[in-house]
Image (cartoon, helix red, strand yellow):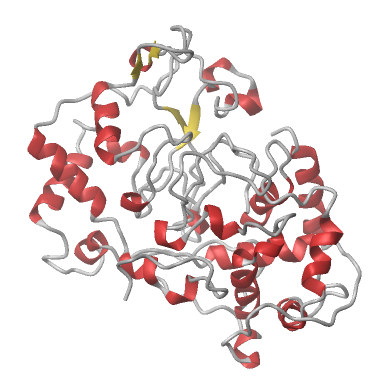
Amino acid sequence: MRNFHKILFYSLLIGLGGCDGGGSSESSSAPASTNSTTSQLTAYSWQLPPGFPTPKVPEDNPITAAKVDLGHFLFYDRRLSINETIACANCHKQNRAFSDGVKTAVGALGGIHPRNAMSLTNVSYNSAFNWANPLLKTLQQQHLVPMFNEFPVELGWSDHEQQILDRLRTDVIYQEKFAQAFPNETEPFSVGSVSKAIAAFVTTLVSGNSAYDKQIYQNQVNGMSDSAKRGMELFNSERLECFHCHGGFNFTQSTNHTKTEFIELEFHNNALYNIGGSGAYPEDGRGLWELTAQQADMGRFRAPTLRNIELTAPYMHDGSIDTLEEVLDHYARGGRNIETGDYAGDGSRSPYKSDLLVGFVLTPEEKQDVINFLKSLTDWEFVCDTRFSDPFGNIPRHASCP
């Protein structure tokens, strides 16, 4: 990340309680909160699904109801982008399980991001954030990336911090919300406060009421269809090897929570590319290698959660696979073969691909069973939960929501 020095600078200031600004206020444009002042001042009450551990919350950002409420509004507020055209929620839409449905994300100034926008489903359980950055350990650190990234510009905060903060300061609703969320801060309107509040809200995006959860964690004998149950057996078999990278309650290797004995953090090359037979990946999409410059890290990315995967297409770090059927075809082959063009090469022959990509053969019925299992991970209650919906009314809910 070419702008990481600035992000690291603000990350250190957040830890020290800095990033202050000045200003005063008069006007209001944020919708009023439905929560009472009393409830906003209380600690956040987790509503965790059966079988789910409590997320690990950083000591420097304890979660309160007031902070979550503020973060909810900031997450959806377009004034947080330099030209007031997009919010965090434009790349993380609830109706797509907090992904965006496009190949790679687009910033406020039209810049094309090299990465697909990851779903925020259960992001509070991640041991690191983004596709291939082990340095970002907390959500408040991670949020500095879209705020300050310049290559491409995402929200566009770099060198415009005070301008954007002043928009919030002059909103009487935000005056109340920031004061309640950060009552001990002399100047609650700061870069640190914004990132911490949004992190607090995103931490609450916990999904665990899918058909799979009803079957496995809620003891509903018919929670899943028979086809999905067969698909689950295949998914967890040594024949397919899926569970090695997408295991546990959150269907990912990289997990951290209050019951974690040791932090899991793994990166894998899943054989999407093998340019010219050298193992190379396209520029700006080389994974962990971009931080380490170690050849063995070429094309290594973090395996994301598979929860709500039905709603988060297109897939892979660069959004280069459109459907679940195509994803299964890719892994069945043991790597993608690109026959022509700049990226030509057979991924199955990459010298850096994971040893877990051995390939497999599925009958059409088995393939459909696995897909039905993946669809059983869709949590419609989460996707339709009004606690997470747009308070400004700009982003519609899913058509299936009541």
Q: Is residue 301 above or below residue 86?
A: above
Q: Is residue 347 above or below residue 143?
A: above
Q: Is residue 46 left or right of residue 34?
A: left
**Which residue is located at x 37 percent, y 38 percent?**
245
Residue drawn at 33 percent across, 66 percent down: 399
Q: Position of residue 215 (x, y in %)?
A: 19, 63
Question: Which quadrant of the rendered structure holds the C terminus?
Answer: bottom left
Q: How many marks?
A: 0
Residue located 81% across and 73% down the image? 169
The quarter holding residue 83 reads bottom right
Towards the viewer: 124 or 340: 340
**Residue 115 in view (yes/no):** yes
Of residue 73 and residue 355, the one placed in the foreground of this image is 73
Asked whether 134 or 343 is in front, the reply is 343
Q: Is residue 138 left or right of residue 187?
A: left
- Residue 295 spot, x, y in % from top left: 56, 15
